[in-house]
Image: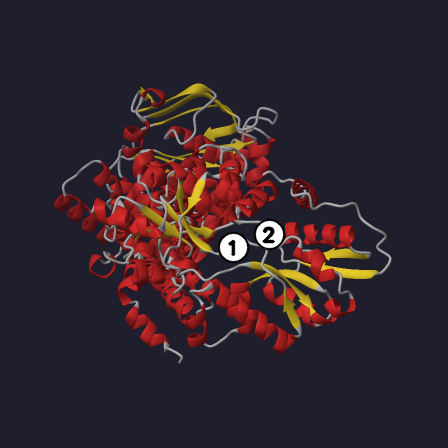
Amino acid sequence: MQQSFFDFIQQQSGKLLEQTLQHIGLTFISLLIAVLAGVPLGILITRKRGWAAPVLGVAGVLQTVPSIALLGFMIPLLGIGPQPAIVALFLYGLLPIIRNTYTGIKEVDPAVTAAATGMGMSRRQLLYKIQLPLAMPVLLAGIRTATVINVGVATLAAYIAAGGLGEFIFGGIALNNTHMILAGAIPAALLAILFDGLLSLLQRIQLRKARTTLYVLPLLLLLLSSFYLLPAAAGGPLLAGFTPEFMGRQDGYLGLKSVYGLRLRTVVINDMIMYKAAYEKKLDVISGSSTDGRVKAFDLVVLDDDKHIFPPYYAAPIVRQATLDKYPELAPALNRLSGTINDSIMTELNYRVDYLKQDPAAVAKDFLVSKGLWQPPRSGAKGVVRIGSKIFGDGYILANMYKMLVEGYTELRAVTRTGLGGTKICFDALVNDQIDLYPEYTGTGLLVILQEPRPVIDSLIGDPQQVYAHVQRAFATRYGIRWLPPIGFNNTYALMMRKQQASELHIKSISDLVNATRAQR
Amino acid sequence: MIKLEHVYKSFNKQHQPAVADVSFEVHPGETLVLLGTSGSGKTTTLRMINRLLTPDSGQIYVNGQAVAEQQPETLRRGIGYVLQDNGLFPHYTVAENIGVVPALLQWDKARIADRTTVLMEKLHLPPGQYRDAYPAQLSGGQQQRVGLARALAADPPVLLMDEPFGALDPVTRASVRREFQALDELQNKTVVMVTHDVQEAFELGTRIGLMDNGRLQQLGTPQELLFAPANDFVRAFFREHHLLLELKALTLADIRPYLPPTAEDDNYQAHVLPGTTSCWDALQQSMNTEGVLSVDFSTTVFTMDSKSLMTALVSRKNEVGHKK
C-alpha cells in the first residue's frame, strides 16, 4: 500500500524539524564566518594594489573544487561532524562575498569618495559612512548568492555526519523512496527561496537605511546560526555512523531498534568515509558490508548478527541452464570453489585488491594455488564460456577464479566480461544470452531480481537455507537459470567496531553491544 | 592666506610633469581663478592645496602654515571644497549632506540644523521642501547649490572650487553663477577656483592664472591678461572672445576718460548704474532703457547712449594701442 507524502511528513515531523534547524544552522554559521572573513578581505584588496587578482583567484579556485571532494579533504584535518562541514561551506561562501565587497566599493562614484576625503573624513569614516553603505546593495547580493549556494551545498553535510536535510535526500535516493527525497528536497528548496527573498527585501530598503543594515545583518546571522546549537542532543557514550540507506531500512537500523532494542547515538554518514572515521575513532559503530576489504584495512571487527535481522547474501555462481546442458563438465569445474571462501577470506582478498591495489587475476591465482586448485590451462578447443561480473570487488576476483577453473579443468576457453554496472545490467546480459554465468548473492536474487511480495520475504529472510532454496527454485522455473552451490561467504550488512574497543568492552555480537550500551547508561 | 612656492608634481616619471614650478599667492577676500584647457595642471594644483595630492617638491601654505605639516583631516575640515560632479552623498539627505563638515567638527545638532536652514535659504532651496530630499530628487542646478552650501557649512576661510559650474547647462550655469556672485557668505573668503570657461573666469576672478602644460603662463587681473599678454599663448588664448572679454573686463569707470564731454548731464534716468559696472552689463542694461544709460561716477552723473559707450571703447583701444 502506498503511503501518502503527507503521512510521511507527519510521521517524520520531529526529524524533519530537527534536520531543518540543523540545515539553517549549518548554512548561517558558515555564512557568518564567511561574512566576518570575506568583507574585511574584500575591503583590504580595494586598498592594496595588486592583491585583488590573487585573492579573488584563490577564492575562485576554492569554488571550483567539487563539494564532495572538499568535504573529503576536510575529514583528515577535522574529522567528521559539523566542523568540517562548516569549514567547507565557509570556503564556498567566501568568493561571492569577497568579490561583491570588492566590486561594491570599487563602484562607488569616485566623485563621492573624493568629496568625502576633501571634506576631511578619515579613511575609517570614509569606509563606514560612505563606502560600505553605498556598496551595501552589491555586498548584500553577494551574501544572497552565498546563502543560496550554502543552502544547496549544506545537503551534502549529511555525508559527513553533520546532519541537515541531506539525511532525508540521500536516504531517499538510497532507498528509492520518493517521499523521503521530497521531504528533504522541498524544505531545502523552500529555505533557499525564503532566505533569498528575505535578503532581497533587505537589499531594497532605502539607501538611507543602508547604514542600519550594517548593524542588523550581523545580528541576524548570529541569531540564525544559533539554530544549530539547539538540537545538539546528548546520548550514550558510543557513537554510531550509518549510511542514509541503512538508517531507513527494516533490515537496517529500524530492525536493530525493533528486534534488538538497540539505542545508540547515531549520525548519518557516507559509506566512502565511514570506515576511515571508525578507524580514526570519530565513530564507534558503523554499518558496513561484511566482506569489505576496509574491514581488514582499518582493523575492524564484524559483530555477529545473532538474531538474524540482516538478510543472507550468500554468493553463488548462476549459470544459464542451456550452457550447463551443452557442457556438462562445466558445473563440476565451477563447484570446486564451493565452500572454500568464508567471510574473512573474502575480506582478505578484497583488501588485497581494493586497498593494496593488487591485480585481481594475480590475487585469484594465488588463492587457487594455495588451495591446490590451480591447474595450467588446457587446450580450450571445445568452446567458449562467457563469465560476467558486477563492477565491485567480489565480482572481479570471483570471475577471474572461475576463468582459471574452467580453463584448468575443462577443454573450454573462458572470457570475462567484468565491470557490468549493477545487478540489472548483469542479470539482463545473462537472460539475453550475452554471458553464460556470473556470481550473484541470494539476498539480491530474492529482493532485487525476484521482488517477491513482503510476506514471502518475511517468511524466508531469517533462514539462509530457505532463501537459497527459494531463489534456486524460482530462477529455474522463471528464467531457466541455475544457482550452483554457494561459495561460502555471506556479503551482507553488518555492524562493525574497532577490534580493540570491541575486545575491551567484550562485544562479539549485536546483543553484546545492546547489553554494553544498557550497562553504561 | 594661500601661498604656493615652486610646486612640482608628476604622476608618471617618464612623462613631463603635470605641474611645474607653480608659485602664487592668494590674499584674503580674493578670488583666484586657475584657467586652462584640460590637462593643463589646474585641477592638480588645486588638489595639492588640500592635500588630496602631495607635491613632489615645493611648499604650500594655508593660513601661513605649511600644509605638509598639518593633519590632512584637520586641514581639509577648514577648507571648503566644491567639485564639478558635485560629489553629493547619495544616501544622505540634503540637510545631512550640508551638515557633513559641521558633524565632523562635532557641532551640536541644533547648531548644525540652524546653519543648514540659513544656508538653504540663502541658496534658494526652501528648507521645508528640500531638507529631507535626496540628491537624486534634485535638478542639476539644485544639486550644485547643495554642493556649494556643503562647502560653506562650517564657514571656512578658504574655499577650493573645481569646475563648480562645469556640469550645468548654459542657462542654469548663468543663474547659479549669479547667485554665487551675490552670496554674502563669500565676502572675505579666499577662493581658488578652477575652470576652463574664459567668460566665467572673467566674471568671477579677481585675478586669473592662465595655465598650460603644467606651467603658469600668466597671473594677473583680467585686464592685464587681456591687454598686456605675457606671451603668444596668452594672446592666442583670448583672441576668439576678445571683444566680449573686453566688455566684461572693463568697467564704466575705465572708459570714462574716453566718453564725449557732452555726456555730463543732470537729467539722468531713474535707473542709475554704479561706475564699477562692467561695460557688458551696462550694454545689457541699455537694452531695457532704449539705449539710454545713467552712470554715477560719485562726483558726477553721466547720461549717455550705448553708441557713445561703444565709441569710447574704440577710442580707448586706439589710444592704448598707440602707446605700445
* Residue B268 position by quadrant: bottom left
Q: Is residue A454 visible?
A: yes
Question: Residue B133's x, y, as percent?
Answer: 27, 58
Taking B164 as reference, is B135 above or below it? below
> Quick one: quadrant of the N terminus of chain B?
top left
Work out how far the residue at label 1 is from the one at label 2, CA to CA, in angstroms.
9 Å
Q: Is residue A104 above or below residue A501?
A: below
Chain identity of mark 1: A
Q: Which residue is mark 1?
A: A491
Of marks 1 and 2, which one's residue comes earlier in the chain?
2
- Give the camera-side residue of A469 and A359: A469
Q: Position of residue A486 (x, y in %)?
A: 58, 59
Q: Amino acid at mark 2?
A: Asp
User: In the rendered view, would you say A264 is above or below B51?
Assistant: below
**What's the residue type where badge 1 is placed?**
Asn
Residue A394, disc: 2
- Residue A425 versus residue A292: which sits nearer the camera? A292
> Image check: A236 left or right of B214?
left
Residue A277, how many percent across, how many down?
A: 42, 42
Q: Nearer the viewer, residue A488 or B279?
A: A488
Report helix, strand or loop for mark 1: loop
- The quadrant the C terminus of chain B occupies is top right
Give the percent coordinates (x, y) of residue A100: 43, 48
Q: Quadrant of residue B58?
A: top left
Element at label 2: helix
Do callouts 1 and 2 mark residues in contact (Cβ within 8 Å)?
A: yes
Question: Who's the residue at 40% across and 32% down the image?
Answer: B52
